[in-house]
């Protein structure tokens, strides 16, 4: 009887410790964009309208190793593929410092980059030109941090996702 009780107690402790160390599940949702996420990044004349944009909320790892959920605004047609890209980054434990719409920085790319924020939609021209940036179409995500500055071009990422099961 004592052995049975010790076995049950040991199994309970093992189960509790493995549950405590369990990696949280990745979450990713695509939702209609909210005005608060566009307030400073959208203006009349943008090449895409709010109805063509979506807010993608996804899990990501912080530089402290903790899981977080952040949001980014992208074109509706690329939103599902972006969830797949972030799922891949999640599995690789790729750290992202911040993941917020540019409106959190009053539409300023400079302020967003200075904060090491990963962002996407921002209705703006390519610097020094009158050509729309890919950000203005919601089809470009900039993963910005001091450790790893990388551009993820959604067209390339979607092509990769279509060729591989993620």
Image: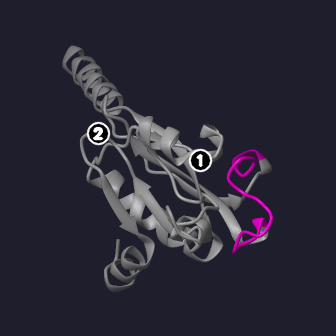
Q: Residues within 10 Å of mark 1 (few under 14, many from 20)?
A: many
> Residue sitting at 44 percent across and 43 percent down?
113
Label disc, if present, on residue 102 of the rendered structure: 1
Picture layout, residue 50 above or below residue 68 = below
CA gap, disc 2 and disc 1: 18 Å
> Residue sitting at 49 percent across and 61 percent down?
127
> Residue sitting at 35 percent across and 71 percent down?
166
> Residue sitting at 54 percent across and 64 percent down?
135
Main secondary structure along the magenta-highlighted residues: loop
Q: Dividing the image into 4 quarters, which one contains the N terminus? A: top left
Q: Please provide percent x and percent y for residue 118.
A: 45, 48
Q: Residues within 10 Å of mark 2 (few under 14, many from 20)?
A: few
User: Picture quarter containing residue 153?
Assistant: bottom left
- What residue span does the magenta drawing correspond to? 36-50
Label disc, if present, on residue 6 of the rendered structure: none
Q: Please provide percent x and percent y for residue 52.
A: 72, 72
Q: Nearer the viewer, residue 16 or 65?
A: 65
Residue 74: say if magenta: no
Q: Please provide percent x and percent y for residue 70.
A: 53, 44
- Find the residue positioned furthest to the top: 2
Label disc, if present, on residue 146 of the rendered structure: 2
Question: Considering the numbered disc 1 on the image, is that residue within a helix, a strand or a loop?
Answer: helix
Q: Nearer the viewer, residue 88 or 157?
A: 157
Residue 46: say if magenta: yes
Residue 131 placement, left or right of 118: right
Going from the N terminus, do you reach mark 2 or mark 1 first? 1
Residue 142 placement, left or right of 105: left
């Amino acid at each position: 009887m004592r052995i049975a009780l010790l076995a049950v107690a040991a199994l309970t402790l093992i189960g509790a410790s493995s549950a405590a160390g369990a990696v949280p599940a990745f979450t990713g949702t695509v939702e209609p964009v909210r005005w608060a996420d566009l307030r400073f990044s959208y203006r009349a004349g943008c090449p895409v309208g709010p109805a063509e944009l979506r807010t993608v909320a996804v899990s990501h790892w912080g530089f402290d190793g903790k899981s977080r959920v952040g949001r980014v605004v992208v074109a509706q047609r690329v939103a599902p593929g972006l969830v797949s890209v972030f799922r891949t980054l999640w599995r690789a434990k790729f750290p992202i410092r911040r993941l917020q719409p540019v409106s959190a920085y009053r539409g300023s790319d400079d302020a967003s980059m200075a904060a090491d924020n990963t962002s996407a939609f921002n209705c703006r021209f390519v610097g020094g030109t009158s050509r729309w940036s890919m950000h203005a179409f919601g089809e470009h995500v900039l993963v910005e941090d001091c450790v790893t500055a990388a551009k993820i071009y959604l067209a390339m990422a979607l092509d990769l996702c279509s060729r591989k099961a993620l």
